[in-house]
Amino acid sequence: MNPSWWMAGVPFACQPDCGKCCDEPGGIVYLRPEDAEIMAQHHGLEVADWLQRDCRQTLDGRWVLKSDPVTDICIYLDEQKKCTTYEARPAQCKSYPFWAENVRSDRSWRKTVSECPGLESEEAFIISGDTIRTKIIEDRDASRGFRQWPPKSR
Ligand code: SF4
C-alpha cells in the first residue's frame, strides 16, 4: 500500500444521527493545548478548571476527555447520541476517520470503512488529499498530547 494512498482524495460524508465513532466504550480522546483552550472557553471556564472538571490524565500523564463512569463513553455524548460540545470539539474528534492509525494499512483502513458509514455513503463527496493530510497531522499532534497546564513550550 502506498503510504500516501489517500492523497488522491477519499469519498466521505459524516452521517447525521450516526454518532458511531463516539459511541464506543473505552474510546480515548487526546487533546492538543489549543483544544483545551477552545473547550474551556466554550464552557466558560479557565483551562485548569475545565481540565479538572471534564478531563483525566492517562497513566503516562497525558490529558484526555473523561468518560462516563457507568457506560465508559465520552461524557459529552447525550442520550440521543449527539455531541453536546460539537462546535468546540477537539481536533481528534474532527479528524476521524482520517486518523494516522486508520490510514496506515489496508487492514486498518478496511476496519475503519466497516465502522464508519460515512465512507460508503451515497452522499459522500471527495475529501482532498491536502485536507486529509491536515487531519492526519492534527490527529498525530493530539496523540502526542500535553501533560501540564500551561504546557512547558508556551
Ligand atoms: S462513524 Fe463516521 S459517519 Fe458516523 S458519526 Fe462518526 S464520522 Fe460520522
Image (cartoon, grey):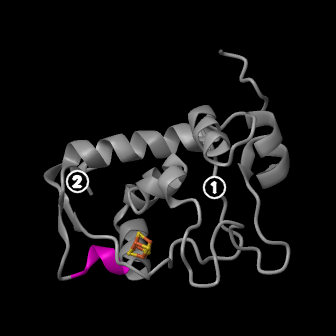
Q: Is residue 86 magenta?
A: no
Task: Report the front residue among 97 and 5.
Answer: 97
Q: Is residue 118 magenta?
A: yes
Residue found 57% across the figure and 59% down from its top? 85
Q: Residues within 10 Å of mark 1 (few under 14, many from 20)?
A: many
Q: Element type at marker 1? A: loop
Q: Quadrant of the C terminus?
A: top right
- Above or below 80: residue 100: above
Q: Quadrant of the N terminus?
A: bottom left
Mark 1 or mark 2, which has the lower sequence index?
Answer: 2
Q: Residue furthest front?
A: 44
**Residue type, label 2:** Trp
**Which residue has dot 2 on it?**
5
- Above or below 107: residue 32: above
Among the 4 quarters of the image, the one containing residue 152: top right
Judge: label 1 CB < 8 Å from ligand 1. Answer: no
**Which residue has dot 1 on it?**
29
Figure quadrant, ligand 1: bottom left
The magenta span reads 117-121
Task: Report the front residue among 66 and 59.
Answer: 66
Residue found 40% across the figure and 63% down from its top? 97
Determine whether, in the image, residue 6 is placed left or right of residue 24: left
Determine whether, in the image, residue 148 is placed left or right of residue 19: right
Asked if residue 60 shows in the view, the reply is no
